[in-house]
């Protein structure tokens, strides 16, 4: 029951409610637990409540970490075995 | 889907796997526990274990909220629905869990109990408003992620003075369970726990933040890396744990910085502490009685506490004697070490906690792992 995916806020309604887009499906959820959610924000939804906002800059930073690892591995492969990295 | 697909890239997974293989010392063993059912699911579903070198092993922890729910609590819910005539609202995952006398919530429903599956706590509250002549009980289970919504509906029920609504509170706490895995009477019996570090939960940490884990890192000298639920998140966390072990560091690191900060969701924490207080002890399926590991409803909300309202006693029900969940959850044994695994104990007919939902260690191995082993 822990599985959840990031959802995009597409509408902010009265009384801390909101509509999110969950992979093409519109769903009403509660925004009561987070402050100042706006249309376009990505949130983590669990049992009908947004628990936190996703920070796109931090997501980019994590992805950059993966990319750096890849670059390092490829370099290592090139230096070490002289082969081309997969 | 944004924030999902880019964290499932198979080619990058191979790269991180190569980094892990390159950095993990060949003659040392690394055992890491993923606490959370969501991680167990990701590891099994995406075959993360297959990408790891042989010296790196993952242990499935007790972080599946349905699995750790003791039979005695489900018995209470069934009692309310069958004997006391309430409408019992529950998250769908609890419906099939076998309870005493060959019952489950689903079977109780077939016997005429009014049991309704809800998606959120708010649905249960709305039902109580819609049916003022009936008593509605919300069977509240789960870790720190489901607790804030329960707190919100309790506050709302009090505001509305909604007298036909109450909550059977079975909310449990992640840090106490991790502590119990590392230090409990059972641990002394089982010998040392071979866990070198933890992959910290994703969603739980959005609520409680990374701060509560700092204690483990220091006190028990175990590294913790909080990770998101996608396969690349888990792989990256494993790489970070390998590095910590190699360097002799025991720190809390946060791979899931896109959603988790050190303090967590303060608003949610505030609501939870207004409504709930610590229980002195609570029985967990698989772990046994764990001190200060769960929440109960504060006196100010006694009116909406199903345990007080219906004067419910708790009676524990032991699992099958041969069930090895206690040892499996502490990394001492594997699902296949259990005599009952896949014979007497299956997801359709679980004998112990780890087989109850697809997020449990034994069930995940039953569904995904066995076939790989056969193929190998
Ligand atoms: S296979 Fe079943 S009985 Fe054995 S340890 Fe797992 S859950 Fe318990």
Image: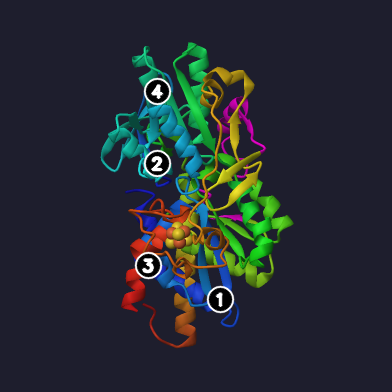
Q: Residue at x 46, y 51 (%)?
A: A59
Q: Chain of mark 3?
A: B
Q: Is residue B185 above or below residue B105?
A: below
In whole angstroms, how far apart are the C-alphas of marks 3 and 2?
A: 24 Å
- Taking the magenta stretch, the answer to whether it contains residue B171 is no
Look at the numbered disc 3 and give the secondary structure of its residue: helix
In whole angstroms, how far apart are the C-alphas of marks 4 and 3?
A: 41 Å
On the image, the x and y values in percent for residue B162 come to 46, 13
Mark nearest the camera among 1 and 4 is 4
- Mark found first going from the N terminus, 4 or 3: 4
Q: Which residues are magenta?
A: B253-280
The answer to the question of whether label 3 and label 1 lie on touching residues, with beta carbons closer than 8 A, is no
Q: Which residue is mark 2?
A: B94
Locate residue B267: give its quadrant.
top right
Residue A30 appears in view? no
Q: Residues within 10 Å of mark 2 (few under 14, many from 20)?
A: many
- Relative placement, left or right, of B262 versus B325 is right
Q: Is residue B313 above or below residue B55?
A: above
The answer to the question of whether label 2 and label 4 lie on touching residues, with beta carbons closer than 8 A, is no
Q: Which residue is mark 1?
A: B23
For the residue with label 1, is its CB less than 8 Å from the closest atom of ligand 1?
no
Q: Residue at x 61, y 47 (%)?
A: B289
Q: Which residue is mark 3?
A: B369
Q: Chain of mark 2?
A: B
The answer to the question of whether label 3 and label 2 lie on touching residues, with beta carbons closer than 8 A, is no
- Mark found first going from the N terminus, 1 or 4: 1
Q: Which residue is mark 4?
A: B86
Q: Residue furthest left?
A: A24
């Amino acid at each position: 029951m822990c599985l959840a995916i990031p959802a995009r806020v597409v509408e902010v309604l009265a009384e801390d409610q909101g509509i999110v887009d969950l992979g093409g499906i519109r769903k009403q959820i509660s925004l009561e637990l987070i402050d100042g959610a706006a249309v376009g924000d990505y949130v983590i939804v669990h049992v009908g409540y947004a628990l936190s906002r996703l920070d796109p800059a931090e997501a980019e930073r994590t992805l950059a970490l993966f990319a750096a690892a890849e670059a390092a591995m490829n370099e290592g492969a090139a230096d070490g075995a002289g082969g081309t990295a997969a | 889907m944004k924030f999902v697909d880019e964290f499932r890239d198979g080619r990058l997974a191979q790269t991180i796997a190569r980094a892990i293989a390159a950095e993990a010392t060949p003659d040392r063993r690394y055992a890491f526990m993923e606490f959370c059912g969501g991680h167990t699911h990701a590891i099994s579903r995406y075959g993360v274990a297959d990408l790891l070198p042989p010296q790196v092993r993952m242990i499935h922890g007790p972080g599946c909220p349905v699995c750790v729910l003791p039979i005695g609590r489900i018995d209470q819910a069934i009692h309310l629905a069958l004997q006391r005539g309430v409408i019992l609202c529950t998250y769908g995952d609890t419906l099939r869990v076998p309870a005493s006398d060959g019952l489950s919530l689903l079977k109780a429903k077939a016997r005429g109990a009014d049991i309704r599956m809800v998606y959120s706590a708010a649905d249960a509250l709305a039902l109580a408003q819609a049916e003022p002549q009936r008593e509605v009980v919300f069977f509240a289970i789960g870790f720190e992620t489901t607790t804030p919504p329960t707190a919100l509906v309790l506050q709302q029920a009090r505001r509305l003075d909604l007298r036909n609504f109450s909550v059977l509170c079975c909310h449990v706490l992640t840090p106490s369970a991790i502590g119990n895995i590392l230090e409990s009477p059972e641990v002394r019996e089982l010998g040392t726990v071979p866990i070198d570090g933890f992959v910290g939960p994703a969603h739980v940490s959005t609520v409680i933040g990374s701060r509560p884990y700092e204690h483990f890192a220091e006190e028990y000298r175990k590294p913790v890396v909080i990770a998101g639920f996608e396969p690349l998140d888990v792989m990256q966390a494993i790489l970070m744990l390998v590095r910590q072990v190699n360097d002799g560091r025991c720190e809390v690191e946060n791979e899931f910085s896109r959603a988790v900060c050190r303090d967590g969701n303060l608003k949610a924490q505030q609501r939870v502490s207004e409504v709930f207080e610590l229980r002195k002890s609570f029985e967990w399926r698989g772990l046994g009685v764990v001190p200060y590991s769960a929440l109960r409803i504060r006196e100010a909300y006694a009116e909406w506490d199903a345990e007080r309202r219906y004067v419910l006693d708790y009676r524990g029900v032991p699992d099958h004697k041969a069930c090895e969940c206690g040892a499996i959850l502490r990394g001492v044994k594997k699902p296949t070490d259990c005599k009952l695994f896949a014979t007497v104990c299956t997801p359709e007919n679980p004998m112990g906690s780890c087989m109850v939902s697809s997020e449990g260690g034994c069930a995940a191995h039953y569904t995904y792992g066995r076939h790989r082993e056969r193929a190998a």
